[in-house]
Image (spheres, rainbow, N blue to C red):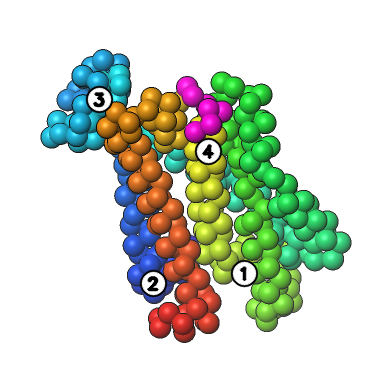
């Protein structure tokens, strides 16, 4: 744990891009966790998402910072609640896909030989499969499914990218002297992977998790926009679907469209900043180019 915390602190202090990206991401996570409290404050004790609690299509004001929708619901409260649902899907899909990717990557990279060939072939198959058309098909035949079910479906198509990246790093690290020393001291494969290899690959695992989570969030948005997502739960994609079907922009009710777009853009920006920062820290050529 001390080694892990030291690695996190070294990473944090070595890149301003990682700091900015992590702070933006942490801000959205805090908003998502506290969304019931925020909604209660916005509604002054009433449910701001209740239908007809306010006049419809109000413009932004001090009482409703982002205005209201066609049913009188506060758009700021909707955005925070939708952010929570979208991040929930992203985290579940990210965790599942990262676990699958890490297991396959470490097994393939460390064992090598036929095991590596078989697992790499499976990974390549999933990489070339057109995932979004399959997601559309599965969603069309799975109407009314829960967010967890959607997250599991998204995770199935999210793990290959992290698996390929981590596997290449494992192939590089398994021949290092400290790994050979661990073998001489009679450590088993499980101990070598978790005690010697994994601590050195935590940044790559973190990037894989963030990328899989963000990809799942955007995939859910895509499904919602075309009307194939779990419409029983409010998320950012459903807000975009509503803004499109209601013709919100033509009515001048731009916040219901702009709010989820801005949130999604900032989520992408934060994860991309973290990714670039990690690349500059762990890639000497990029570090030299960036002047770090």
Q: Is residue 183 left or right of residue 232?
A: right
Q: Residue at x 44, y 41 (%)?
A: 87
Of circles 4 and 2, the one toward us is 4
Answer above or below: position of 72 versus 116: above
**In this view of the protein, can residue 47 be seen by the observer?**
no
| 254 in the magenta segment | no
Depth check: 273 or 25 in front?
A: 273
Most extreme residue toward the front is 250
| Crowding near the residue tagged with mark 3, few <14, some 14–19, many ≥20 C-alpha atoms within 10 Å | many
The reply to whether discs 1 and 4 touch (Cβ–Cβ < 8 Å) is no
**Which label's residue is closer to the chain start, 4 or 2?**
2
Q: Residue at x 35, y 46 (%)?
A: 262
Q: CA distance from mark 1 to mark 4?
A: 40 Å
Residue at the spot of label 2: 15
Residue at the spot of label 1: 196
Residue 176 location (% of width, % of height): 68, 79
Q: Quadrant of the C terminus?
A: bottom left
Most extreme residue toward the top is 52
Residue 168 location (% of width, % of height): 68, 68
Q: CA distance from mark 4 to mark 3?
A: 25 Å
Which numbered circle lies on residue 222?
Answer: 4
Which numbered circle lies on residue 57?
Answer: 3
Taken as a whole, is the magenta stretch helix, strand or loop?
A: loop
| 231 in the magenta segment | yes
Q: CA distance from mark 3 to mark 2?
A: 44 Å
The part of the chain drawn in magenta is 225-232
Of circles 1 and 4, the one toward us is 4
């Amino acid at each position: 744990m001390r080694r892990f915390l030291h690695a996190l602190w070294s990473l944090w202090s070595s890149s301003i891009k990682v700091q900015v990206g992590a702070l933006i991401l942490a801000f959205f996570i805090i908003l998502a966790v506290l969304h019931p409290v925020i909604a209660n404050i916005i509604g002054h004790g009433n449910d701001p998402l209740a239908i007809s609690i306010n006049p419809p299509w109000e413009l932004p004001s001090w009482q409703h910072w982002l205005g209201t929708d066609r049913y009188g619901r506060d758009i700021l409260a909707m955005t925070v609640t939708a952010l929570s649902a979208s991040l929930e899907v992203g985290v579940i899909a990210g965790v599942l896909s990262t676990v699958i990717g890490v297991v396959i990557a470490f097994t393939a990279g460390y064992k090598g030989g036929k095991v590596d060939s078989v697992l790499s072939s499976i990974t390549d198959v999933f990489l070339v499969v057109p995932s979004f058309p399959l997601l559309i098909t599965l969603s069309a035949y799975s109407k009314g499914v829960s967010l967890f079910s959607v997250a599991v479906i998204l995770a199935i198509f999210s793990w290959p990218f992290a698996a390929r990246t981590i596997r290449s790093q494992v192939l590089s690290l398994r021949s290092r002297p400290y790994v050979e020393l661990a073998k001489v001291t009679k450590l088993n494969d499980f101990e070598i992977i978790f005690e010697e290899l994994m601590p050195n690959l935590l940044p790559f695992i973190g990037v894989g998790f963030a990328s899989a989570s963000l990809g799942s969030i955007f995939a859910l948005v895509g499904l919602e926009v075309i009307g194939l997502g779990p419409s029983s739960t409010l998320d950012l994609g459903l807000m975009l679907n509503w803004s499109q079907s209601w013709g919100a922009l033509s009515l001048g009710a731009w916040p219901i469209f702009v709010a989820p777009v801005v949130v999604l853009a900032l989520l992408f920006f934060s994860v991309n900043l973290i990714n670039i920062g990690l690349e500059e820290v762990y890639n000497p050529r990029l570090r030299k180019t960036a002047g770090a």
